[in-house]
Image: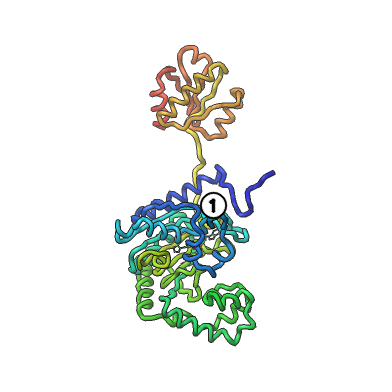
Amino acid sequence: MIKAVTGTRDILPTDIPKWKYLESIIKSVFTLYNYKEIRTPVFEETSLFARGIGEATDIVSKEMYTFLDRSGESLTLRPEMTAGVVRAFIEHSLDKKQNLSKLYYVSPMFRQERPQAGRLRQFHQFGAEAIGSYDPLLDAEMIIMAYEIFKALGLKNLLVKINSLGVPASREDYKKKLAEYLQPYFDKLSNESKKRFETNILRIFDSKEAEDQKIMKDAPLLIDHLDDESLSHFAKVKQVLTSAQIPFEIDAMLVRGLDYYTNTTFEIVSGSVGSQSALCGGGRYNGLVKELGGDDVPGVGFAAGMERILLACENEKSFSLNDETVDLYLVVIEKELGNYAYQTAVELRRKGLIVDMDYLGRSVKAQMREANKLNTGFVLFIGGEEYAKGELVLKNMKDGNQKSFPKDDLEKIFSSIKEN
Ligand code: HAM
């Protein structure tokens, strides 16, 4: 038997209502903040991600689904959206149309990671990017929007972590200091961290190895070596979050796994989902547009993992939805009236009712069982003595009341159902 590929998942009809609910909250919050939806292709030229996210990152060096197409071009299934959104921003000169582009997305992403709870190879992100302004209000806005979405879902066990990585110049000075500090411990570092010492020394803060963590506990922190402008930018972000009543914590070790960040970085983690606890992550990327061939335009954004969020909602039982139901089920008493029943269903659907009926030639008893299973509001009986008199019987399944209607007056049947 052929099964779904490891790390990919079917979203079955029974799961769809919670996905739709999540999507409706995402859309309404982004709309309130006047972000507009953008959809970009699922695959892009590989070099877009290599240049955008950084060659040395885990995503680019280990996790991308990269393939050569039939013309020999190297393409990659997108592991994240920011690079693609920035590519579209440059390609369509969005900055010529509007000084500030406020964009949002809800889309599948692909990373070849080791699957576990909350970590998949095809997963879904929603996120936002604001391209065109240095204003720290927008850094705070990303955190506020994510937080509002999580709150609207009823999530409680949340922690907002923020940090600042400063500008590349002050970071380069700091990296030298960090290297000086680490030099004497180099032999004790894990192999992965030894590699990162050369390629991206900041990422040693992300190591999960106990020995590495012990060494990093006393390492100098970037936040203590920021230039004045970065410090005042960060101060404004904190001030806005405080006035918006978003509780946050400063995590000076939060470096994030993508190379494009400058200044603010943040994550919101949940205490309800186990080790893969980051529900969202993001930050400012003032050099990315230029890096990808555009003008020197700043940006800031975030993305959130939808499977993880739904897992947190499930574990916290943060919301419940009403069962899906149908308005009307047609019970066909005489088989030869099947066509007539079907035509009636079509007409009532055209009026806007959710209607279902039997397609399996079942007995009246089995049709009633099905109607109950579907939790239908009403049953319309087609056939029997009433039908012979030119009438159809409508049964209200909530109170058991029955009413007869002239067979050709579907408008009356429709209004009677709609009134309830
Ligand atoms: P990221 O931290 O790589 O950032 O991913 C954002 C979120 O996507 C994570 O916090 C997590 O919830 C979810 N996620 C990531 N990988 C997986 C996976 N394998 N399975 C399930 N969920 C996952 C970015 O992607 C940046 N583009 C965020 C950003 C936007 N920064 C600025 N603008």
Q: Nearer the viewer, residue 170 or 255?
A: 170
Q: Is residue 20 above or below residue 102?
A: above
Direction from residue 180 to residue 246 in the image, left or right: left
The residue shown at (56%, 17%) is 334
Q: Residues within 10 Å of mark 1 (few under 14, many from 20)?
A: few
Work out which quarter of the rendered image holds the N terminus and state it: top right
Instruction: Give x and y (percent) for residue 312.
Output: 54, 57
Instruction: Give x and y (percent) for residue 5.
Output: 63, 51
Work out which quarter of the rendered image holds the C terminus and state it: top left
Residue located farthest toward the right when viewing the structure as drawn: 1
The residue shown at (54%, 70%) is 56
Q: How is the image coloured?
A: rainbow
Instruction: Give x and y (percent) for residue 134.
Output: 34, 69
Q: Is ligand 1 closer than 8 angstroms to the Cβ of mark 1? A: no
Residue located farthest toward the top when viewing the structure as drawn: 389
In this figure, what is the number of numbered marks? Answer: 1
The residue shown at (50%, 49%) is 19
Q: Is residue 278 above or below residue 342?
A: below
Residue 157 in sight? no
Q: Nearer the viewer, residue 21 or 247?
A: 21
| Three-letter amino acid code at the position of disc 1 | Ser
Direction from residue 284 to residue 371 in the image, left or right: right
Q: Is residue 341 above or below residue 220?
A: above
Could you say which quadrant of the image residue 162 lies in?
bottom left
Instruction: Give x and y (percent) for residue 257.
Output: 52, 68
Q: Is residue 114 above or below residue 16?
A: below
Find disc 1 in the rendering and name its residue.
71
Could you say which quadrant of the image residue 228 lies in?
bottom left
In terms of secondary structure, where does tag 1 sit? Answer: loop
The residue shown at (54%, 20%) is 338
Residue 57 in sight? yes
